[in-house]
Amino acid sequence: MNKTSQKINCNTNLIKRENINECKDNQRFFIGDELQYLFDKPLFKGSHVRANGFSNLWIVNPDYIKENFSSDFYTKNADGSLNLSFTIYYSSQSVYYFYFIMSIVFSVFYLGITYYLTFKKNNEV
């Protein structure tokens, strides 16, 4: 890893350890915006590697950004570097949320059908 300065914007406290900056988890459970990324194509899937044996690292090529994305996606600094804004999410968690919601929907549907059939049978007698 090169020793470049990194700016991380967190809505909660920033955790700093050695050369790693990360946002403290705010312990939220499913707000709803997680599912919007479920079917999006990952931007830098091929550039993801493990760093320090446990953490995530994405190698982002600025030339690739300039060639494949509009200037709305980034801002260019005076020194030629780019400022980028990403949303990093754990896709497996989004899949879990999707199936969790689907199981609730089908459970309510099943219980509704069961109640309806039971209630209809009891009224016919």
Image (spheres, grey):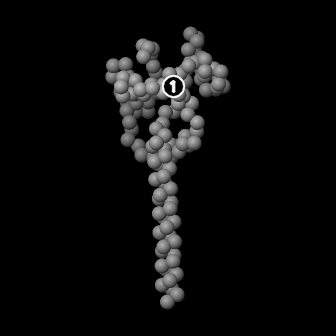
Q: Residue at x 50, y 50 (%)?
A: 98
Neighbourhood count class around disc 1 (C-alpha, 10 Å): few under 14, some 14–19, many 20 upward: few
**Rendered position, 77 above or below 118:** above
Q: Which residue is mark 1?
A: 47
45 shown above or below 75: below
Residue located at (49% from left, 46% from top) = 95
In x, y percent, where is residue 70?
Answer: 66, 25
Q: Is residue 37 above or below residue 108?
A: above
- Rendered view: 60 above or below 28: above
Q: How many discs mark residues in the rendered view?
A: 1
Q: Quadrant of residue 43?
A: top right
The answer to whether any part of residue 31 appears in the image is no
In the current view of this chain or complex, which residue is farthest to the front? 46
Q: Secondary structure at mark 1?
A: helix
Foreground residue among 53 and 17: 53
**Rendering coords of residue 16 (x, y %):** 35, 23
For image coordinates 61% across by 21% down, the residue present is: 64
Q: Position of residue 41 (x, y in %)?
A: 58, 36
Q: Amino acid at mark 1?
A: Ser
Q: Is residue 12 visible?
A: yes
Image point (56%, 19%), residue name: 61
- In front: 80, or 96? 96
- Dividing the picture into quarters, in which one does residue 82 lie? top right
